[in-house]
Image (tube, helix red, strand yellow):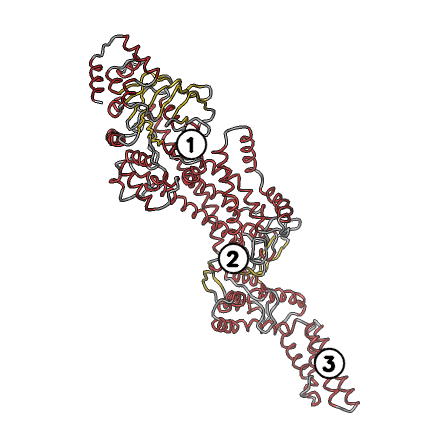
Amino acid sequence: MKEEDKNMQQSALNTKKSQNMKIIRIERKQTMAPKSLDSDCSNCAVISSDDFSFYYGSRMGVKNITMGIYPCSITAIIGPSGCGKSTFLRSINRMNDLIPHIRTEGTLKVDGQDIYDKRINLISLRQQIGMVFQKPNPFPKSIFDNVAYGPRLQGIRNSEDLQDIVEQCLRSAAIWDEVKDDLKKSALALSGGQQQRLCIARALATKPRVILMDEPCSALDPLATGKIEDLMEQLKTSYTIIIVTHNMQQAARVSERTAFFCLGELIEYDLTSKIFGNPANKQTEDYITGRFG
Amino acid sequence: MRIFLRTIFDKTFTIMTYLVVLMIVALLVIILGPMLSRGLSAVIFKDTIEFRKMQFALYNRGNQSRILQETKETNAFRQKIYQTIDKFKQGIDTEALTEKVRKIYREFGQQLRYKELPPEQFTILRTQAKEIRDKLETAFASQDKSEIASCINNVMQYRDDQRFKDTAADGFFKLALEFKNSVEKIDLSKHYLYVKSLQELESLITELLGPRPDEPLPSTAMNQFGATRWDIAQRILDKILWTEQWVEHKPNELLVKIKALRAEQFAGTDIEPLFSYIKDNIEEMLKPKAKFYWQYFIDDSTPGHYFGGVGPEILGTLLLTLLSMLFAVPIGIIAAAYLTECSSENLIIKIIRMCINTLAGVPSIVFGLFGLSFFVLFFLPLLGFPSKPCILAASLTLAILTLPVMIRASEEAIRSVPQTYKEASLALGAGKFKTFMKVTMPAALPGILTGIILSLSRVAGETAPVLFTGAVALGPMPSSIFHSTRTLSYGSYDMAVGDRIAMMVPHNQYGMVATLVILILCLNIMAIVVRSRMFRKLHGH
């Protein structure tokens, strides 16, 4: 790992590399994830998408995405609005099913299983892949009921068990100290940042392996954002996190790997330090430096 | 300049909105104010001793010894009226007098037969008795005072006769004397007028004071008691004191109503002072007291809607309303859930939605006839129940009537639940049904309750749908849902158009309408409180 980092730093320092190198890198990316990553964690991509395309009716959402997402790390997806970041994220737990007339091509595998297979159990899939949304959306119920919602669906009725799970999840989401005294209070009475952490706790309660975050901090102030970012840092030791964000500093701060989407296509996917230090693609560089257009 | 104009427009707009709100409030006050105040007169009023008697006799309410005491006190004052009238009647009611004379004559004949007198004497006595009888009858029929006097004098000759002493014939002389005394003050040419006026007066007094204590009780309850309320007593008193006459002032013009003192009809007679006596002593005769008759809301009414309250009506209305809600709410919510959650916008859904909207505009009488032909005549026999109007059929009809409102309100409520709630629930691994039951429904419940409130008010107040399917104007308390019931709405309608007895008690009419309004108001307030509490609980304020 340290070796890799050193390499990254060196390449970041040499910002003006030859054109050939870039071409080679792009070719690598198109075949699969960067080679350096493969060596780091071989054959253990939790989510792997292979030439995955998604259509809303006749309109294209994302096209030919080929990437692998690795466990116990944070993967950030950045890109301009309407580039298909959220579409791809929501494809992973099939939240896009709510929209009529959708169509997919290629495969999207979670643990080696194609999730767009007709035989897939949607409920267990969604329990394995938790999701946190752009706007904090706690249910209009008590804090306790919010967190206990998932476990209850799984059939846990014992109140002591539920109590344990709720406490554990609230602790993991770093909100326990703030709400432990009034778990019976409505979740809507919490502040925005607290609500979002509650939503994370709620997502943790189903014991997922992957957590999808769709711009989780875009509705929050910097302080609350900081808290959520700290939380993500803690969570990545045991969960695989994919975060869609508009905030490039955030992506640079929290993620190990970053994918850059543009117009429904995956332009570049690499270690974060590489993307932000020495992007292989001109478009990525333009976007990161703010010269996009 | 432009800013100046803009502020003026702003101010005008504000004032206009205030005015509109004020107008609505004023309208409400104008509509509800008189209705409630008049309706309250059925509950809060001044009652009389007759009311207390009625409550004791019909509802077994009140202190018996106290009522008896009061009856005694009032009867003491009433007695004078009866005596005066009876006395006056003796000079007036010739038919009754004639009847009495004949009765005495017959009794006397019987007595003679048992005395075993010699036949000659018997014949003489019979003849004399017959003569007395004929003379008296002539006197009764006569309008000439001198003729009467001579006849009476003729009769009186026999008074000291030993043969008539201590026999039934004594009655002749007593009658003759009484008649002589009463006739003295009467203008006999007005004889028939007196008879007519006296009859009127007597019926009015019966209305005011009830039947005389010595008379047998009439069979119907409404005739057993006098004026039970002080306001009615006042009205009757007014009728007793004043007569209304239609008089032609000028030829070829409309008749004019004039009021005249009834006492003038009896000018110079013993009856004349009676009017001032009634006027002065009416309080002693009726003993008015302020009364809060809260039992109005639980009492059965008898006969018709004359006495008593609206207990069965309230019960029936509540039963019908709640039962119809029991049918309409689940069906409405399920239909709304289908329309919002389970279907995409296609032709069939459009047709269904159009049908619902059309149903919402169908006149309620059409639903009533549908209920009769479908539920009463087809559906109930199909299930093996008797095919007659009943609570079940009526509430089903009402449920159908209110379904469109219910569906539309629930649909709006479900639609207004943020999509993010559903997304969050689905992302946690809940299925469609669980998401609806556990997240969407609770969040939509305040909105659904609004629909329920709208439906409740509509159902509780509808008359036409229950007209043929389960409502009756009068009937026993329902003991099962297969019996027909009384309802406030139908009761109000019936009292307004059909019930002649009810027309004599306008306070009960107002009372019933006001009760309906208050009932709906209470149901609404209840639902609003529940809704706001639910809303507060959901949003943690």
Name the subunit of mark 2. B
Picture coordinates of residue B535, whole percent (x, y)? 38, 42
Q: Is residue B16 visible?
A: no
Q: CA distance from mark 3 to mark 2?
A: 56 Å
- Residue, disc 2: B311
User: Total number of numbered labels?
Assistant: 3
Picture coordinates of residue A73, whole percent (x, y)? 28, 27
The numbered disc on residue A122 is 1
Q: CA distance from mark 1 to mark 3?
A: 111 Å
- Residue A243 vs A166, above or below: the answer is above
Determine whether the residue tagged by mark 2 lies in a helix, strand or loop: helix
Q: Amino acid at mark 3?
A: Arg
Q: Is residue B257 left or right of residue B24?
A: right
- Residue A282 vs B12, above or below: the answer is above
Farthest residue in the right direction? B120
The numbered disc on residue B306 is none
Q: Nearer the viewer, residue A292 or B377?
A: A292
- Residue A277 vs B100, above or below: the answer is above
Q: Earlier in the sequence, mark 3 or mark 2?
A: 3
Nearer the viewer's eye, disc 3 or disc 2? Answer: 2
Discs 1, 3: same chain: no
Q: Nearer the viewer, residue B282 or B190?
A: B282
Discs 1, 2: same chain: no
- Residue, disc 3: B106
